Image: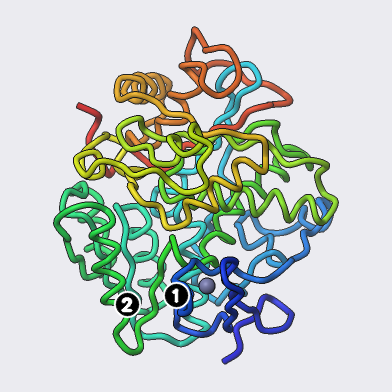
Amino acid sequence: MPTTAAAGPPLTLACAACGWAQPLSDPGWSCPRCGGVLDLDWQPSIPDLATLAGRPPTLWRYREALPVSEPPGLSMGEGMTPLIGAAPGVVLKVDYLMPTGSFKDRGAVLLAALASQLRVSQLVADSSGNAGSAIAAYAARAGIACEVYVPAATSEGKLDQLRAYGAVVRRVPGSREDTAAAAAVAAGRPGVFYASHVYNPVFLHGTKTYALELWEQLGGRLPDVLVLPVGNGTLVLGCYLAGRELLAAGRIDALPRLVAVQAEGCAPLAAAMAAGGTEPETVAPARATGGTIAEGIAIARPARGAQILAAVRATGGTIVTVTEDQIRAGWADLARSGLYVEPTSAVCWAAVLSGKTGQAGLAGSVSQSDDRPHTVVPLCGTGLKSHPPA
Ligand SMILES: [Zn+2]
């Protein structure tokens, strides 16, 4: 079955490193020639604000810009998460108000739609938690069996959620990379679709809707600065993709600066950025497994690391780090404002509070709104699945 966007020719996956190309419907999930990551070779159109105005408030409103069409019965209303004022010029986008409690629903619903379109019967995913939950939920709605590989240390709340959706959970000792390796082996079985939020670029076309929504919610503009957490970089790369598509469509005049945030305890991308490197720096094994309470971004060897570094640089942005104490302080400040997020989701607010995102450090806490925000900070995952930081 050809795999197409709402209306258009079959889509192609391409390897930027060596030029390999294959149909999106092909089960291969990385470049068979050089092992590189694959991207969609596609330039979608972005509807104007007037066209979008009457559509239902889900991410499917950007259908012209999505590489798969919406299957009946799959959506749970994902998308169009609210903005709330946080400080002068700074707003929060509350992306944990998604069906499974994290922004990962944006990509997961597209992967499930693709799997449906390809008529596969088995999905394999790997995750530190939230991506797995999201994929398991949408697999359940699509009626597709799902097996999720997670690091042994993953929060019980996330495991409970996976099992509730009917997923088979495989706990893997060691680092996040060991989990990915185990999933990759399982994904090699015949008839299995690897619903990888890291390798499958369709996921990034889902996460890009975070920035498309922002553009629409701000009346046809993007803020000067997007502060984003970065581990595997799915939100960073999605926002970069959205920025480039909006720019190509003439909907914006310049890309927003991407200021990505890592935990100091596991910061291969921040180290590379500081050193002028084009590949992630090596992280000591102890740090790769237990260097930070921000478990969702404790990624020692991000597969798309070179792309992340190039994307951030292309926007004039940077990658900063926050300490464990700063993450705890950011988390507590959000909680005192009624915003209960997982520790990983506090890193961006922690970076803003400590003055690492370009403006002066904010003495106060989450406070008033602003009509024209220059900085937008996501709250990516609910705190209900995890423990408060110790
Ligand atoms: Zn290649």
Task: Report, in whole angstroms, how far the alpha carbon at label 2 lies from the one at label 1.
Answer: 9 Å
Q: Does 308 sit above or below residue 322?
A: below
Q: Amino acid at mark 2?
A: Ala
Q: Does 80 sit above or below residue 361?
A: below
Residue 51 is situated, as x and y percent measured from the top left of the image, at: 82, 58
Q: Is mark 2 within 8 Å of ligand 1?
A: no
Q: Secondary structure at mark 2?
A: helix
The disc at residue 372 is none
Q: Which quarter of the rendered picture does the C terminus lie within?
A: top left
Seen as rendered, the residue at the extreme top is 363
Q: Secondary structure at mark 1?
A: loop
Q: Amino acid at mark 1?
A: Trp
Q: Residue at x 57, y 92 (%)?
A: 1
Name the residue tied to disc 1.
29
Q: Sequence order check: which comes first, mark 2 or mark 1? A: 1
Name the residue tied to disc 2.
187
Of residues 301 and 118, the one nearer the viewer is: 301
Q: Is residue 288 left or right of residue 340?
A: left
Of residues 238 and 28, the one nearer the viewer is: 28
